[in-house]
Image (spheres, rainbow, N blue to C red):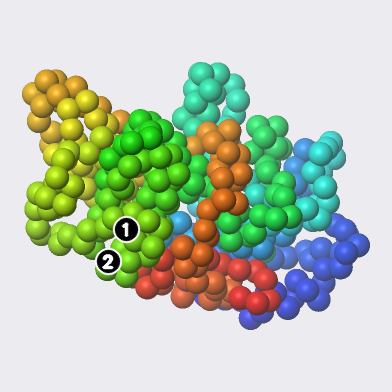
Amino acid sequence: MTSRRSDPIATAAATTTPGGPAALPDTMLAAVLYGRADLRLEERPRPTAGPGEVVLRVRRCGICGSDVRTYARGPSARYALPVVLGHEFVGQVVELGPGVEGVPLGARATAAPAIPCGRCAACRRGEDNLCQNLLDFGINIDGGLAEYVRIPARSIRAGALVVLPDQLSDAAAILGEPIGCCLRGLRRGAVRAGSTVVVIGDGPIGLTHAILAQEMGARRVLCVGHNPARLETIARAGAATLAVEATSDPAGAILAVLGQQPDTVVAAVPDPRALETAVRLIRDGGSVVAFGGLAGDPSITIDGNRLHYGEWTLLGSFNCTTAEFREAIDLAGRLDVGLFEATLYPLTRISDAFEAARTRATLKAVVSMEPTA
């Protein structure tokens, strides 16, 4: 990764005044993905707001596990390269395009990462997370790992831009997307009051599932992983934890701890073995949630007779709807965001942030454009 400007915060501060769009700089610093292991910190033209659009000055942007995997293993065909990464962002409204109403200049705001078209069959069914024409920040439109990000008119029409209340912190706001996605997954997995839930995964997504399952009234929540430090954090969130070795029999170890088969199992790591373990665990009539894409060969083996006779359900969960994202923003203010132990990095240290996330040296790497980072 290379940088062409040493201090983006100082430069922005020197050229930006409360005077409005005319005072904004012409350029910005951005983390741009060009291909596998090719993320460049470079100066780009600052986006401007066209009709129906909004420009945010980014305050914070979280680094998602999908960002790290895309960088390390290479982007899929969906990526419109080169593209600015980042979809977990919060910013301040600094420019309004013609026709934008109800969005105050200067307000803090965030936006759902996936922008539906509103016209395809999935959107008409109310499943806009499955939109056939999705625009995704950091995938096929520029995202929030930059000093500024443009919110398309389509996002605003869909209700995906959320103006934040003063009492909601930036740290909570950037959790909107992971909360929304996990909320959808747990609901699809039929988690309810009294449920016994197993979450396979000890990263930020595993932690989010563990917290939300308890919020939904689960009686027992067991989070399974390999990293003792991360499992200790999840234990502080109130869930039971179990450390297992990759070469061991995780299903047997989990059942020995639980003493029963769980109602819901969430496979929240990008490993087909986690999904096969989940299938081995689930009780008759229970639900297995395949959460997140799988790395390498995504094939899994299941016992078809057990599926038939046991009437258990295997289902996927992808993204969240716009409505679920807005619900997640409301929920974020009630959660203890300190549990995510975010480590802040300035944009100029983007390579350090990605390396910390990749090596799991931090639970949550967050890029901050604020001078305190």
In the rendered image, which residue does mark 1 sit on? 202
Residue sitting nearer the eye, 13 or 226: 226
Query: Residue 117 occupies which quadrant of the picture?
Result: top right
Residue 211: x and y in percent read: 42, 50
Task: Using residue 120 as the reference point, say whether residue 151 is left or right of it.
Answer: right
Task: Using residue 315 as the reference point, say whether residue 337 is left or right of it.
Answer: right
Residue 100: x and y in percent read: 81, 39
Task: Using residue 261 as the reference point, say whether residue 166 is left or right of it.
Answer: right
Label annotation for residue 114: none
The count of marks equals 2
Residue 28: x and y in percent read: 69, 66
Query: Residue 218 occupies which quadrant of the picture?
Result: top left
Residue sitting nearer the eye, 15 or 260: 260
Residue 300: tell me if it is visible.
no
Q: CA distance from mark 2 to mark 1?
A: 7 Å
| Quarter that holds the C terminus | bottom right
Residue sitting nearer the eye, 124 or 169: 169
In the rendered image, which residue does mark 2 sit on? 227
Per the image, label 2 sits on a secondary structure element best described as: loop
Residue type at mark 1: give it. Answer: Asp
Q: Earlier in the sequence, mark 2 or mark 1?
A: 1
Residue sitting nearer the eye, 178 or 190: 190
Residue type at mark 2: give it. Answer: Asn
Residue at image coords 19%, 36%? 282
Few, some or many residues within 10 Å of mark 1 (<14, 14–19, 20+): many
Residue at image coords 49%, 33%? 129
Query: From the viewer's perspective, is residue 192 above or below residue 113?
Result: above
Contact (Cβ within 8 Å) of mark 2 with mark 1? yes
Query: Residue 52 occupies which quadrant of the picture?
Result: top right
Residue at image coords 44%, 36%? 184
